[in-house]
Image: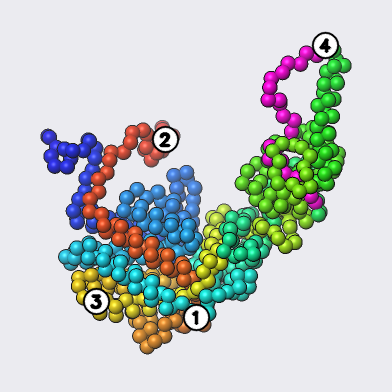
Amino acid sequence: MQPYGIQSMLKDGYRHLSGLDEAVIKNIEACKELSTITRTSLGPNGMNKMVINHLDKLFVTNDAGTIVNELEIQHPAAKILVLAAKAQQEEIGDGANLTISFAGELLQNAGALIRAGLHPSDIITGYNKAITKTVEILEQLVESGSETMDVRNKDEVVFRMRAAVASKQFGQEEIICSLVADACIQVCPKNPTNFNVDNVRVAKLLGGGLHNSCIVRGMVLKSDAVGSIKRMEKAKVAVFAGGVDTNATETKGTVLIHSAEQLENYAKTEEAKVEELIKAVAESGAKVIVSGGSVGEMALHFCERYKIMVLKISSKFELRRFCRTAGAVAHLKLSRPSPDDLGYVDSIAVEEIGGVTVTIARNEQGGNSISAVVLRGSTDSILDDLERAVDDGVNTYMAMCRDSRIVPGAAATEIELAQRLKEYANAETGLHSHAILKYAESFQFVPQTLADNAGLDAMEIIASLYTGHGSGNTKLGIDLEEGACKDVSETKVWDLFATKLFALKYASDAACTVLRVDQIIMAKQAGGPRRDLAAAAGAGAEED
């Protein structure tokens, strides 16, 4: 049968979806499904998800950023929400779940308006007006006096970090916040806005528990020293990126040897050359050599003779971090380093922690640019989840270095925004006022989800929150431990203003982008074996 309409213009295999039912409603359904997955992981009592990716790696986490990354979502509309969550993760490092869940809620409410007969363009106009008003209200809710803070004051840092860490590891936030705050304050530069997240490293070592975790001012390498010297105190360090070995010459040469004596002399000259190089390094004052490549046996022999400790770091990124830790300059090939190029460490030693041999390079004096959080836990999954909590803490520290303003947490801000937006919607005229009203109602999902995840009566809590906020208490939030509404000044649950602002902005942008789509045209997938089909075929072959 001859294709007709738009299909007659396109190649075979193209799919074309248009209209409200086929495109808009289906897009909204897909985004709603995605937000349903992440929503149950919102807040301190959020449930964990068990995700097994295409490489058979197991993830047990309630971190929305990790979940949506590993799900490999194919639906184009749902991908827009994933991109919004990634943007939030890169900008702030926390709040990805709020972004996805809120965007899903906005789209679900938009779906109800579309079915009621409202055009998507009216809904988009309403949503755009609502987000502008939301930003205005959010700035009024900022806690007075929080505009300035001392980023080197541990108590102030922990105060702002607790909520972000508690949403990942509820009940253990005090220990984690204390570790992260110490690590961040150690590496905070003179100008805090230049704080680099990469300077706080995480070393995960199996065994023990979280209470065994500690901070190291310096670096932790999961490798042993090469050779028999395992410890050095107050040592100068020489770093060679190209390795410590005798290299073949760049040009090819042929050596004719006529007698055994010549052969012996030939070997001796090689030995003498290596010894000369190692001796030059030793005379420069270096007691530790760090190699980025292989370490030759002959070179190692002379290093032992001159009492030089040798380390091998294969990763060039780790090598760069080591150079930052010690303040050294990496040389390309083995040669005598100048005094300015040498680094310095207070101590470098090989230790055994929980059955794992690690090399710890410490720099206790000020001016250290790298610190490591050594995490201990019973399983890999627990360690991975702890690492995500630490990452969230470090990212929150970076955000507070740039903007330290805070707003009430525990759903207090959301209920206040909902209440004020409803008043604004009632004052507006035109069809878009319905969209603003739905935008305001969308904020209710936060207290509802927090209450549901904690096993509390959501309707009762939302009602008492509205009552409290109606009487002027803008800081009334949910105390999940007691299952009642409390002032956040008592429970000390505060969120960063920047986290909330970007999460709501990205969610609104993503929702409006999805609503603007009225046609989907999908090309036929490119040829070649598909990964899932190949895996299925492989599994079938194994069964045979």
Q: Amino acid at mark 3?
A: Glu
Residue drawn at the location 50% of the way across and 73% of the way down = 405
Distance Cα–Cα, label 3 vs label 1: 30 Å
Mark 2 or 3, closer to the camera: 3
**Residue 204 at what x, y percent from top left?**
62, 55
Q: Can you tell which mark lies on residue 335?
A: none
Q: Residue furthest right?
A: 261
Task: Kindly report the secondary structure that dominates the magenta region of the rendered protein.
Answer: loop
Image quadrant in which you'd find residue 415: bottom left
Mark 1 or 2, closer to the camera: 1
Task: Identify the mark nearer the N-term, 3 or 1.
Answer: 1
Q: Are marks 1 and 2 in contact (CB under 8 Å)?
A: no
Task: Identify the mark nearer the N-term, 4 or 1.
Answer: 1
Q: Can you tell which mark lies on residue 538?
A: 2
| Disc 4 packing (10 Å; few <14; some 14–19; many ≥20) | few
Q: Which residue is mark 1?
A: 144
**Residue 458 at what x, y percent from top left?**
36, 76
Q: Amino acid at mark 4?
A: His
Q: Can you tell which mark lies on residue 428?
A: 3
User: Which structural element holds mark 1?
Assistant: loop
**Residue 408 at what x, y percent from top left?**
46, 77
From the viewer's side, name the closer residue of 57 and 199: 199
Image position of 60 with respect to 181: above or below: above
Task: Identify the mark nearer the N-term, 2 or 3.
Answer: 3
Q: Are marks 3 and 1 in contact (CB under 8 Å)?
A: no
Q: Which residues are magenta?
A: 235-257
Q: Amino acid at mark 1?
A: Ser
